[in-house]
Image: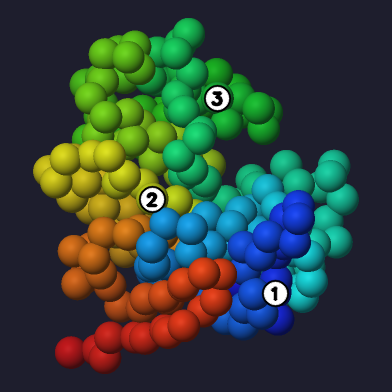
Amino acid sequence: MIEFQHVSKRYAHDVSALSDINLTVAKGELVFLAGPSGAGKSTLLKLIAAIERPSSGRVTLNGQDIGKIKRAGVPYLRRNLGLIFQQQRLLQDRHVLANVMLPLLVTGASRAEAERRALAALDKVGLLERARSEPQALSGGEQQRAAIARAIVNRPQLILADEPTANLDRDSANQVLEALTAFHSAGVTCLISTHDEQFLDSATRVIYLRQGQLIETWRKEAA
C-alpha cells in the first residue's frame, strides 16, 4: 500500500529530516513509528499525506507517486486518508458534532447523511453523549477522540496518527489507542507515531527512526 524508495527530506540550510528511507507497508497493517523527538516520524507521515514532498526518492501510495501529484489533486488523495496531527485542532466556533460532520460536507454529502455518519463515528469513539458539547468543554482525551472521529468519518483506507496520545494521562491515552486499534481490526491500515514505549508492547510491527534514519524494524511473530 505504501512504499518509500531511497527517500530523503531536507529543509533550509541543508537540515536533514529523513535520509535514504526504504520501507513498505502492506494493506491492513498496524505499524508503530518509534524514536525520540526529532527522529523524523512526523516528516515521514507528512510525506505520505502530501503535506511535505520528498527532496529525493519516491513515495507511493497504492501505486501512485505522491511527489508527482499536483496541488489540485491533493484533496482527492486525502479523501482516503484519516489524518490525526497534533496541529489539527477542533474548530472552537462549532460543537463537536459539527466538527466531525465537516469533512463529509466538504465532499458533498447531504447534511442528513453527514450527521448520521458523524454520530456513528462519535459512537465508535465513545463520545456520542458529547456530540452537542463545545470543544472547550471536553477533556484533552475527549478532544483527541473527537479528532479521531473526524478523521475516520470518511471511512478512510489509511489512518496516519502523529503522537495521538501526547500530553494525555494514561487512561485517556489508552482510550485513544483502543479507538485506533479498533479501526485497524475493521481492516483499516494504521501508521501511528509514538515515543511512548508502553504502547509498543501491543504492536505487531515497529519501525524505529533516529536522526532521520531507519535503524530497525521488527514484526512480532503470530501466536
Q: Position of residue 73 (x, y in %)?
A: 81, 47
Do the numbered discs 2 and 3 sit on residues whose CB atoms are within 8 Å?
no
> 128 and 202: which one is in front?
202
Query: Which element is circle 2 on?
Result: loop
Q: Considering only vertical position in the picture, is 28 above or below 181?
A: below
Numbered disc total: 3
First reached walking from the N terminus: tag 3 or tag 1: 1
Q: Which residue is mark 3?
A: 102
Q: Are marks 3 and 1 in contact (CB under 8 Å)?
A: no
Left or right of 122: which side holds 115? right
Q: Quadrant of the N terminus?
A: bottom right
Distance from the alpha carbon under mark 2 to that under mark 3: 23 Å
- Badge 3 local density, few (<14 within 10 Å), some, or many (20+)? some
Q: Position of residue 146 (x, y in %)?
A: 35, 31
Q: Tell me, for residue 7, which label it has, or none.
A: 1
Q: Which residue occupies 75% across, 61% down?
A: 14
Measured in 3D between alpha carbons, the distance from the residue under mark 3 to the one under mark 1, in whole angstroms, is 33 Å
| Residue depicted at 45% across the width and 51% down the height | 162
Label 2 or label 3, whichever comes before in sequence order: 3
Judge whether 97 appears above or below 127 on screen: above
